[in-house]
Image: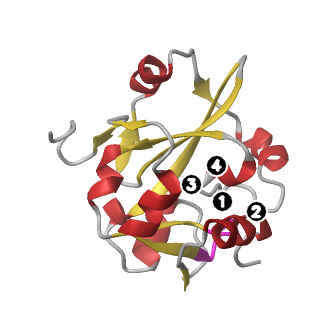
Amino acid sequence: MAIAKTLINYLEEKGVNYDLVEHAHTSTSFASARASDLPPHQVAKAVVLKDGDGYVVSVLPTNHTLEIDWVNEELNRNLELACEDEFKSLFKDCEAGAVPALGDAYGIQVIWDDDLAYTADVYIEAGDHEHLIWLDRKAFKTLMSSLPHTVISKDEEVGCWKY
């Protein structure tokens, strides 16, 4: 399938440089990092949350665990995990389970983890299970600068954020 058309249009509209990284078929962002020989902290995963007011895409390093309570506190909402069945209607040009971290391209609110601001390169799902989109730090920050961000996850190795 390759990169989703919505993502291509969004990236071109924003005028950021990006590239595609091809890898073997995988079913998780962590597996995509391994298949691409990338450090897991540089691969951003998207976790879709929902409440009565709609959906939110939480973006965090793939080796982190989302803390929904922290997201709810920051956004003053009562979010819970969305079901994968719901993704098909939200990300129509993406394969099931290949949710891109650029929810803004799909008109979905985004909150991202501050840890991603400190990595040189960020890789995100391209809408299928065989490609990642490479963004350098400047391009990632350009895309995310107007979106809410804070510490919303824990590092699996450390057990808490490091600041």
Q: Where is residue 40 drawn, in percent x and y?
A: 35, 63
Q: Which residue is mark 2?
A: 95
- Real-space CA distance between mark 1 and mark 4, rounded to the nearest whole angstrom: 12 Å
Residue 117 within the segment the image draws in magenta: no
Question: 44 or 114: nearer the eye?
Answer: 114
N-term mark: 2 or 4: 2
| Residue at image point 70% right, 66% down | 7
Q: Nearer the viewer, mark 1 or mark 4?
A: 4
Q: Secondary structure at mark 1?
A: loop
* Disc 1 + disc 2, Cβ < 8 Å: yes
- Real-space CA distance between mark 3 and mark 2, rounded to the nearest whole angstrom: 14 Å
Q: Which residue is mark 3?
A: 101
- Any mark on residue 112, and which? none
41 shown above or below 75:
below
Q: Nearer the viewer, mark 1 or mark 3?
A: 3
Magenta residue span:
126-131
* Disc 1 + disc 4, Cβ < 8 Å: no
Q: Within 10 Å of the Cα at label 3, are there few (<14), some (14-19), or many (20+) other Cα atoms?
A: many
Q: Nearer the viewer, mark 3 or mark 2?
A: 3
Q: Which residue is mark 4?
A: 103
| Residue at image point 37% right, 34% down | 152
Q: Which residue is mark 1?
A: 98
